[in-house]
Amino acid sequence: MQIAEITYTVSESGNLTIPDTVLREMGIGPGSVVHIAYLTQDGQQNTFQEFLLSSNPLEKLTEEQQLRVPTHMLEDSNIPADADLQIICLDGCIVICQDSALTPDELAEVLSRLQVAGELTSSLPSDPVQMQDKIEEFINYFQEGADPSDL
């Protein structure tokens, strides 16, 4: 499954027109009821100026259309099962974390550290014993106050 994206421009009168051929390809035709879902912090404002257009309400999405994170993975990450999640897509990885009030600068710092962690793990040897030795070396290095970007 992939996510497809189409770009349209809102007219000067504030209308968004989606051609009927595109709607038909989505399974939406004359008389179809459509639902628009968006992310909001206050229950009103479209916080990220994005929306999902669907012929089904969110609670009726099929199993294949839903994103589910196994409860045991949330528990292992100390994230409550009913927590709002934040999903960040990066080159080569997807980060799922409990939604927080991180500022853009704080989020950039977290992502930078994840990138460094990815670079460190890609440099690990494939032999398990050598890998464990290298990880212990990294841990000692960081415990001594080293900056991960120095590696």
Image (tube, rainbow, N blue to C red):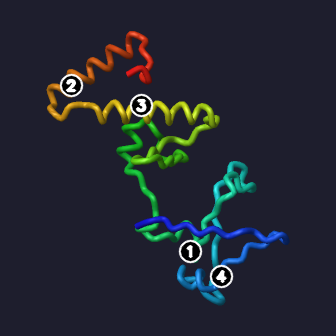
Q: Is residue 11 above or below residue 69?
A: below
* 2 or 1: mark nearer the eye: 2
Q: Verify CB contact (< 8 Å) between mark 3 and mark 1.
A: no
- Per the image, label 2 sits on a secondary structure element best described as helix
Which comes before the other along the chain, label 4 or label 1? 4
Left or right: 123 as drawn, with respect to 151:
left
Left or right: 73 as drawn, with respect to 48:
left
Q: Position of residue 128 (x, y in %)?
A: 16, 31
Question: Quick one: which residue is furthest to the top in this view?
Answer: 144
Closer to us: 13 or 48: 13
Q: Residues within 10 Å of mark 3 (few under 14, many from 20)?
A: some
Q: Position of residue 108 (x, y in %)?
A: 56, 35
Residue type at numbered disc 1: Asn
Mark 2 and mark 1: Cα distance apart in space? 49 Å
Q: Which mark is residue 19?
A: 4
Q: Is residue 25 above or below residue 132?
A: below
- Per the image, label 4 sits on a secondary structure element best described as loop
Q: Residues within 10 Å of mark 1 (few under 14, many from 20)?
A: few
- The residue drawn where x is 45% and y is 58% is 67
- Per the image, label 3 sits on a secondary structure element best described as helix
Which comes before the other along the chain, label 2 or label 1? 1
Residue type at numbered disc 3: Val
Residue type at numbered disc 4: Pro
Q: Which mark is residue 132?
A: 2
- The residue drawn where x is 59% and y is 31% is 106
- The residue drawn where x is 48% and y is 42% is 97
* Res 2 quadrant in image: bottom left
Residue type at numbered disc 2: Gln
Mark 4 and mark 3: Cα distance apart in space? 44 Å
- Dot 1 corresponds to which residue? 56
- Dot 3 corresponds to which residue? 116
Question: Quick one: which residue is furthest to the right in this view?
Answer: 13
